[in-house]
Amino acid sequence: MTKRHVTRRGVLRTSALAGAGLALPTYLRAQESGFTNAPTGDTVTLGFNVPQTGPYADEGADELRAFELAVEHLNGGGDGGMMQTFSEQNLDGSGILGKKVEYVTGDTQTKSDAARASARSMIEKDGAVMISGGSSSGVAIAVQGLCQEAGVIFMSGLTHSNDTTGKDKKANGFRHFFNAYMSAAALGPVLEGLYGTDRKAYHLTADYTWGWSQQESIQSATEALGWETVENVLTPLAQTDFSSYIAPVLQSGADVLVLNHYGGNMVNSLTNAVQFGLREAQANGKDFQIVVPLYSELMARGAGENIAGIPGSQNWDWKIENQLGERYKGTNAFVQSFGKKYGFPPSQAAHTCYAQTLLYADAVTRAGSFNPCAIAEALEDFEFDGLGNGPTLYRAADHQCFKDVVVVRGKENPEDEFDLVEIVEATPVEQVTYEPDHPMFSGGSLGSCNAGA
Amino acid sequence: MGLLDVKDVNKRFGGLQALGDVNLSVAENSVHAIIGPNGAGKSTLLNCLVGKLIPDTGSVMFAGRSVLGRKPYEINQMGISRVFQTPEIFGDLSVFENMMIPLFAKRDGAFRMHAFEGVTQERGLIGEAEKMLDEVDMLDKRELHAGSLSRGDKRRLEMAMCLIQRPKLLLLDEPTAGMARADTNNTIELLKTIKNKRDITMCIIEHDMHVVFSLADRITVLAQGTPLVEDVPENIKGHPKVKEAYLGEAA
Amino acid sequence: MLGLGKKDLGLLAAVAALTLLAPFLLNPFPSDSSLAQFNAGYPDLMQRFVIFGIFAIGFNILFGLTGYLSFGHAAFLGVGSYAAVWMFKLLTMNVIPAIILSVIVAGLFALLIGFISLRRSGIYFAILTLAFAQMSFALAYSVLTPITNGETGLQIALDDPRILGVSATADGSIPVTHLFGLEMRATEILNLGPWQFQFSAGYYLCAAIMLAAFYLSIRIFRSPFGMMLRAVKSNQQRLYYTGLNARPYTLAAFVISGMYAGLAGGLLASMDPLAGAERMQWTASGEVVLMTILGGAGTLIGPVLGAGFIKYFENIFSKLNDNVLHGWFAFLPDGLENAVVAIIHPFVGKGWHLTLGLMFMLVVIFLPGGLVEGGQRIGRLFRRKRGSEERAAQQTPAE
Amino acid sequence: MDALILQTLNGLDKGSAYALIALGLTLIFGTLGVVNFAHGALFMIGAFCAVTLQRILSASYVTIDDSRTDFLGNPMEVETPYVHAWFGESVGAGIIEWSVPLAILFSIPVMLLIGFVMERGLIKHFYKRPHADQILVTFGLAIVLQEIVKYFYGANPIPTPAPDALTGSFDFGVLLGFDPNVIIYPYWRLVYFAFAALVIGAVFSFLQFTTFGMVVRAGMADRETVGLLGINIDKRFTIMFGIAAAVAGLAGVMYAPINSPNYHMGMDFLVLSFVVVVVGGMGSLPGAVLAGFLLGILESFASMTQVINLIPGINQIIIYVVAIVVLLVRPRGLMGRKGVMEE
């Protein structure tokens, strides 16, 4: 077997035939620049890879709206959105480093395979220097791995599993969204306040990595409060009717049901739980309660009135600046420009994608280069504010953002279909911060930054 | 001892006694016909011979070996070929390819891959196939799609496919069913030629008395699952029991 | 030559020429033109074309020849991918051992499933294979996560043992897959005027293997074994009464096509070292069925065409967005431009499934023999009236 | 014991949906010999009939309320359903609330029409084509149908609640002499089960006791002979297809409150309903119903913690394990006729 790695990354070489009029393509993958897809013309291409088909298509569509808005703002269009409130004022609407921002879109289909194929086509065909987006952790981890190998930056979209910045973290990957551990840490005190310390919890958990990661986190957080875990039942991802999992809950002696589900799973399991009368039931002399650790606006809309009163956590909520004040500035600026353009308020998925795009553009500007390694350096241990989440840190050790977590619960009488949750509190960042070597995040390492070419 | 010996065969389907104590002996190199009214159990008997059905009791011996419990393809390998009421051929293959399949089967037994040789490399077998096709007057149709043949040609092809296996016993299940008189006569002539050219035993199940009396050496009359008589054709004609069986059917 | 007839040799040569020149043929538009979106000549998609071509060629050996409709073939592709990635993790990043192992593992898995499923035929067989594949998928996604890494998919990592290689390169990166030192993602770029052509080492490896697989499939089609398989499809009853047991033949065909699927899975993992459970889902099995029927089941080249067709739609149409559409029709007056974009909008981008569904329907309604029949019809337009011997020849499945 | 009763109830309920879908599939296969991969899509369209009716009934006019502001700070646009204005608020709200049961009436003509159009326009041309072609064309149609629904309704599930009187749950255990709170079951699921039983009963009596049904049953057994009798079997088969579509649609309408409808719910049921049909025996109507309930119950049992702890992952694969065992032990399915679809 050979160990010849002469040109480690020297894989993409450009040759031109003599005599052929050499018009430079919009991009070059050349050695001369030292990194993959270095933009040479007056434009730079970003790749937005979101689910456009399958169950998360609406979430993907919302992410895409945010990306388009971000590109518009970067290129000087619109009202500038959060660029106005961003603590770094490097972005002036002239694109990124003076290059006009262009973008390509792709469909992840919420499948690792398809997502990687789509990302590869963006890198190989369209010359994208950064990939962003996505609506599930499996896809995020798969695409993050690809970007690491290809030497481009990955700014993940909605991904909540601990693994994305835990055992599967990568030097080229960055996550703005919060994670399962943070959800649990934020929810813990709130649950204590709402339901006390003497509770017995029954967990239904989606049987894949995110579900386990969420369940493990919330179990340890609630057990720390003194709650007891009666049972944890794994439900198949493809399950649509959860009646046979919900029905035994009341008999089990539990008085809280934790639904570690997301998307369609969560809509269905919650609907079923309410059908079985769990919301009105009594157990152990207390009112029975349901908890959904990770909330999203689209899920809330799908579950309709069933979410009334049910607590959960979010990365961000469009009402937060109005309700909790100046600390979360940027929110209103973003909601205004998004709402004016599209007619309804943005989801947290849209927010994280918008923020990631701005963060990337800003990092490029500060680094003065599109070189992924320079960008990574600019993002590592970067502290910023004004993007709607309050003061935030991009930690160098694992490329995870640390910021306040929003704890919400379903509104009893929503005014319209976008006003489904009310904010309970914003758990301060200190409470949700953990050590990089926390057992739930250990194993795996960032490795070294890869600039490709 | 005949080539084929059926002893005390019984077969029930639920409450229906399809075959009751059937005894039959087919002598080597003879043409033995089995006749009988509809529902007499002719087809059931035939299916017991080829392994499609297993009798409840009794024995079926072919050339001294029992066929019971063997699969149809194993029984075929023992030397019994079958012509069906409606010709069963490989409709998606060419006439020539239809002929090659039994040749491969004979050479290779039940399974041999031969995945990397061309069919056209089998010189010896090709000659054999062409000779057989010639014998049934179908050489000019060798490249035709077998599914597109006329019914009469399909019948010839099926017989050729059976004969090329050089079976010891050829079972024919109403070989002229649904044929026009001219085709029927052609088939009778074909069968006579075949009979004269080679050592072969035939067992024919037939409705058409004309065919039976033109070909058979011996005849068994079956009624309600039981053999009534077995005799040479001359004695079957006008036999009172036979008349009764058929008239009974007519009534 | 090569044991092939003249016609088959011509076909093989044509396919060889097309695959070797694919980087040119698939990039007909200058890279800065607005039609560059339709270019498919980048390594990832070209690799997918030939890899799924292999998958479909193998599937066609089973379905096209014997008529047995397997609805679980993706399981073999998935198993092959897992085997290959484990080889990368444990042994070496060289693709050869990985590909060999993936073919072997998929073959064994096919032997097991085929042995049980082939006890039934028709739709019962289809449902049995479907059930096995769905079981494999469900287990790989959940219970078998220690082996398959579940939802995320099996990836190579910095701490893999890799006995005959390095766990990490000198600068702390994960090593890449290679063929005796030739990195699979090595790509030569040729700029010719405004055109850009990419020559990927991985693609040419896949293409070479695809040609070998295609050649093998021609040989099988034309062999006594292939004839026997067609006889199985045509009339199993007659086959039985001709002294032949169909089971060993169908099982052999099943295993061979399972090995083709494993080969495709191994190659997918070699080009991009990741094996996801979705590869085994019933939709993935359905996809290869569609590729084969769409191209023309039972024909030699059809499945390859079908694979290319579907993968092209998936990868090209899904990437068209309104932005791109506005770019194309910018020359129109504003109102008209918006109207045209609004009409096309539902069919591209997130609507690519709609276009694909319509294509399935149109092809199967108007071209019952698949794309190959479309080709034949066009061919016939050019050479009408050539006598009846031609018609006879068309009835035996040709290309 | 109580747990088993509870899971049996669950199974019967799940089984109702499976049985209804499989019944339609079997009707189509038995009468027309067509493998219809678009049947799941018909179920989905049924559910969206409920969504559509709910939207029609809550069609609103907009008034501007200056006292409140929307999220952008503009005066709030308040939507008032027309039915509120016409019938008063409480009656209007009542009408909207009962949109799912009302959708039963709405869906029958819609589904029959879709069925007729599908059969006359497309399926008719595929009677003589190989099953593979039928699969491809109906699969293509299924994709097209669900993409159309997605285009108009989005990919997110849409809540379609049952009327208030039928939500909530019912203590079934007390009736059987168990302690309170042991066997609690939602009203709507009981309604669903009763409804399914009614539809199944109706289809069977229709086939059993009407001349039309007799001809169709005869046609299922031997199409050619019935054709020879001079009976226009094609027309009847078209109607049969419409009925099968309506059965799938009704299953979908009533399913909408159980799980919020989304555009791909049909695909989720497709594979499963084929497994049900095959386990029951291709072409056997009682078989389809029996297998539907059987698989529903087994699926429920397999999801019990005690069972999962014994065999991890069994809840993921139980349906397929059952299918494999049944097909190997009883090749024709539970109640299938010999020789159907074996070649």
Image: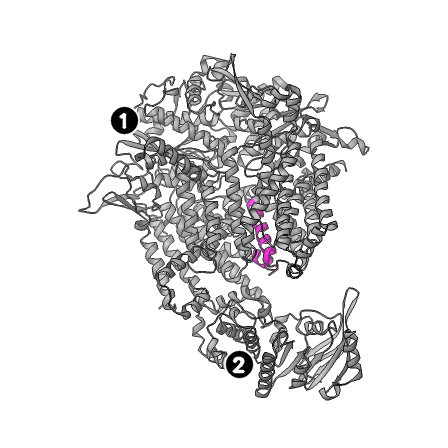
Question: Is C183 in front, or is D51?
Answer: D51
Instruction: Look at the image and tell me in which quarter the N terminus of chain D lies.
Output: top right
Please, what is the three-letter code of the amino acid marked with disc 2? Val
The stretch in magenta equals: C112-137
**Callouts 1 and 2 on one subunit:** no
Question: On the rendered structure, is A101 left or right of B198?
Answer: left
Q: Residue A98, labelled with which disc?
A: 1
Residue A402: % across, % down: 45, 23
Residue occupying the point 32% across, 32% down? C333
Residue type, numbered disc 1: Gly
Q: Which residue is mark 2?
A: B136
Residue A239 at x, y percent in the picture: 60, 38
- Mark linked to residue C288: none
Q: Which element type, helix, strand or loop, lies under badge 2?
A: loop
Residue A367 higher or lower than D231, as above or below: above
Q: Is residue A56 visible?
A: no
- Residue D44 horizontal side relative to residue B16, left or right: left
Q: Residues within 10 Å of mark 2 (few under 14, many from 20)?
A: some
Q: Is residue A146 magenta?
A: no
Q: Tell me: C193 left or right of A449.
A: left
Residue B42 screen position, x and y as percent:
71, 74
